Image: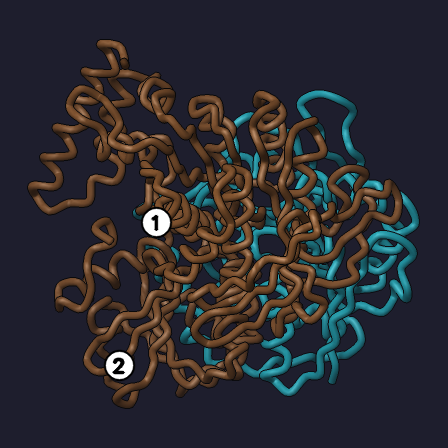
Chain colours: A cyan, B brown
């Protein structure tokens, strides 16, 4: 068994420690005896866009997001949509999440068109949401750290990833955090997200491996350290944020 | 002579300081806050009195060490610096440093202002201080919860520097494109420093980079040599922006476990004596170059400067060593990925298999977002670690980082209590061995407080 991980724009969308998500996906596969290869996909012609089982798309600085937005407006955006139609999964955070939506509407100037894989729209907000973010979901709790001024609103095809317990989440208004649509997930959880939310990491692994294999069963791992980190971070989110 | 308001602010601040000191506390910020509340112009009023003017040292990493080196150099030249040496580097820290060194009549007991300035406060601080010299060491991602994005921060600093009078000299790191670019926006004297030694490039692979694109035209930069993250020999293939010529350059850097030896060359053609930097790590060699370049900007003699550096002693948590129960504790402050990678680069250069106390906290001074540990290159460190005792308010996140970097379970232990963590690591280490303490700011303060109670060291504000 092998896993193919694509890291989208690792040279431009790489702030806030989001690369920990790639580390988590890789290690949790390797610990189960699954071979892993990680390839970067950045600005310019993509080699073999049909290769990945799962894409990771992190947050970036404004400068990086402008360049990436322009790149995705062309052939690479279509390639990404085609890959999802072909069964690949995507995990995106912050800027990456916003760029997968329909559009980003800045305070002034024309709106930036997104890839449109997620039925979400983001508008610029005045106050930046910075702090620990704790959310509940039917499948487990989510803990991370948010740092964004964009307000994201979900359309009917996207379902919230979780319900906010502490922090702001998508927009600070409707208590939703993140979005799920098919095998595509977007969220505002830095931290990094997947190491402290191992159930989500394993869900993505299952989806990714399911692209080329039938009946994927992931052996359980000892997640004692992961849960201890989550408990400590959740306590901070509840009491100090 | 300062005006009446400054006199009142001075007196109130000094009283606050006396009160805090009498109860055994540090007084590195609160007295300044009191004075600034009474007189917002307090810093301007007092710093304008200083005969040799003011120098500011800013940047992400190396501020405290560079400023301390420059303080020693200025003292060797007979100057009396007023300096926020504890590293309390917001406005209130600057005001508190002034208060500590004024008379009750608000007359400064020194003739040179030397202020380490938090990089986010630099734009407002230079307006108040009107410095002769501004040093910027480097710009890396740091405390994203507070500074947000690096490009925006660099732009703010550039705007502020562009507004300074033409006789202010900038001292900038030529090897950091974000820093070097600060000079290109204004027509003023600039002294660049950098490392020209072709053999310098870390043993740590560069997993993160903050400035892969040209700060002027956004084209990907080309590197012929990478020192650390985006620092190195860089050029833009499109607009032609490139690493500027160095006025103070290290042509050879010999790194050793207790310090380094730097051969210097200047563009004026003079070959200086080699410089002994008595604290290890390439990043401290950079700090020494920054201090020497600043000394030149202040017209201080280089021979004295080199002598002062040779006798330098490190600051709070900057590779200082402490004897404790027959072991040597080496304290290393880590607070962002670049600083962490530089510190572990220095550890691994010397072939150590370190025993660690690693402490991660998430108070404001540490950065409330601990995500940065995933950008730091724990994968380079983990294979060499003999044993790690993990502590801190977010120690569990740190333990998880080590786990995902591949450190075996039996080599890691989480001990929540500060004192117990130090004792556990010391007990595990053989007599005479070294224990490396990697800690974020408030975690280092807590660990030092534990050590201070045993009489092993002094509180940081007294050193």
Residue B81 lies in quadrant: top left
In front of the other: A219 or B324: B324
The circle on residue B451 is none
Q: Position of residue B6 (x, y in %)?
A: 25, 16
Question: Where is mark 1, residue-wise?
Answer: B363
Q: Residue B58 location in percent, x, y?
A: 49, 41
Is B279 positioned to the left or the right of B174 in the image? Answer: left
A99 above or below B199? above
Q: Nearer the viewer, residue A92 or B387?
A: B387
Which residue, given by chain and number where applicable, does mark 2 sit on? Answer: B327
**Rendered view: B8 above or below A120:** above
**Distance in Å between CA atoms under marks 1 and 2:** 29 Å
Q: Residue at x 77, y 37 (%)?
A: B216
Q: Is residue B73 left or right of residue B170?
A: left
Residue A4, quarter of the rendered image: bottom right
Closer to the N terminus: mark 1 or mark 2?
Answer: 2
Query: Image quadrant for the C terminus of chain A?
Result: top left
Please provide percent x and percent y for residue B108.
26, 27
Residues at discs 1 and 2 in contact (Cβ within 8 Å): no
Q: Residue at x 43, y 47 (%)?
A: B70
Q: Position of residue B137 (x, y in %)?
A: 55, 47
Quadrant including the N terminus of chain A? bottom right
Of marks 1 and 2, the one in the foreground: 2
Name which residue lies at 41% across and 40% down.
B116
């Amino acid at each position: 068994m092998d896993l193919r991980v694509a890291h989208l724009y690792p040279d431009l969308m790489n702030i806030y420690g989001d690369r920990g998500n790639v580390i988590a996906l890789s290690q949790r596969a390797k610990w189960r005896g699954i071979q892993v290869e990680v390839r970067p996909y950045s600005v310019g012609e993509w080699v073999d866009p049909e290769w990945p089982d799962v894409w990771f798309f992190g947050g970036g600085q404004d400068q990086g997001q402008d360049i990436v937005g322009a790149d995705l407006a062309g052939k690479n955006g279509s390639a990404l949509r085609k890959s999802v139609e072909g069964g690949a999964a995507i995990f995106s955070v912050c800027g990456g999440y916003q760029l997968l939506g329909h559009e980003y509407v800045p305070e002034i100037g024309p709106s930036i068109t997104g890839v449109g894989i997620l039925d979400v729209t983001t508008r610029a907000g005045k106050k930046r949401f910075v702090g620990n973010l704790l959310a509940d979901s039917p499948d487990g709790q989510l803990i991370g750290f948010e740092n964004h001024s964009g307000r994201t609103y979900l359309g009917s095809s996207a379902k919230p990833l979780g319900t906010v317990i502490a922090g702001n989440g998508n927009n600070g208004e409707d208590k939703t955090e993140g979005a799920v649509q098919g095998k595509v997930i977007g969220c505002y959880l830095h931290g990094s997200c997947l190491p402290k939310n191992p159930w989500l990491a394993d869900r993505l692994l299952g989806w990714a491996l399911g692209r080329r294999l039938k009946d994927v069963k992931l052996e359980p791992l000892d997640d004692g350290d992961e849960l201890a980190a989550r408990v400590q971070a959740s306590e901070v989110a509840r009491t100090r944020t | 002579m300062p005006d009446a308001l400054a006199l009142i602010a001075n007196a109130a601040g000094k009283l606050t300081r006396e009160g805090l000191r009498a109860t055994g506390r540090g007084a590195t910020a609160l007295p300044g806050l009191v004075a600034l509340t009474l007189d917002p112009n307090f810093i301007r009023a007092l710093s304008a009195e200083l005969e040799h003017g003011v120098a500011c040292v800013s940047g992400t990493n190396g501020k405290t060490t560079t400023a301390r080196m420059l303080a020693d150099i200025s003292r060797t030249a007979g100057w009396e610096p007023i300096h926020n040496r504890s590293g309390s580097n917001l406005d209130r820290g600057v005001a508190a440093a002034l208060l500590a060194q004024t008379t009750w009549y608000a007359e400064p007991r020194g003739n040179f202002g030397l202020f380490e300035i938090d990089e986010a406060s630099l734009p407002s601080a230079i307006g108040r201080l009107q410095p002769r010299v501004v040093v910027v060491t480097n710009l890396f991602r740091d405390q994203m919860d507070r500074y947000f994005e690096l490009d925006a921060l660099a732009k703010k600093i550039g705007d502020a520097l562009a507004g300074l009078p033409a006789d202010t000299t900038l001292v900038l790191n030529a090897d950091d494109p974000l820093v070097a670019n600060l000079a290109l926006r204004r027509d003023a004297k600039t002294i660049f420093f950098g490392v020209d030694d072709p053999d310098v490039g870390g043993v740590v692979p560069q997993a993160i980079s903050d400035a892969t694109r040209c700060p002027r035209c956004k084209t990907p930069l080309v590197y012929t040599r990478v020192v650390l993250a985006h620092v190195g020999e860089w050029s833009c293939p499109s607009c032609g922006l490139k690493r500027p010529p160095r006025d103070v350059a290290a042509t050879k850097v010999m790194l050793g476990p207790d310090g380094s030896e730097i051969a210097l060359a200047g563009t004026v053609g003079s070959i200086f004596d080699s410089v002994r930097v008595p604290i290890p790590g390439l990043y401290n060699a950079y700090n020494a170059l920054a201090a020497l370049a600043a000394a030149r900007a202040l017209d201080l003699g280089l021979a004295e400067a080199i002598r002062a550096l040779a006798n330098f002693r490190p600051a709070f948590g900057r590779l200082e060593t402490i004897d404790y129960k027959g072991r040597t504790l080496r304290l290393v402050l880590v607070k962002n990925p670049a600083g962490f990678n530089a510190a572990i680069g220095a550890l691994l250069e010397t072939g150590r298999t370190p025993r660690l106390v690693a402490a991660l906290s998430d108070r404001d001074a540490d950065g409330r977002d601990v995500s940065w540990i995933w950008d730091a290159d724990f994968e380079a460190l983990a294979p060499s670690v003999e044993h790690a005792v993990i502590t801190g308010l977010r120690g569990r996140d740190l333990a998880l980082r080590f786990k995902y970097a591949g450190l075996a379970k039996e080599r890691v232990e989480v001990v929540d209590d500060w004192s117990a963590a130090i004792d556990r690591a010391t007990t595990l280490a053989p007599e005479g061995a070294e224990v490396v303490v990697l800690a974020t700011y408030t975690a280092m303060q807590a660990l030092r407080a534990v050590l201070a109670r045993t009489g092993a060291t002094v509180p940081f504000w007294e050193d």
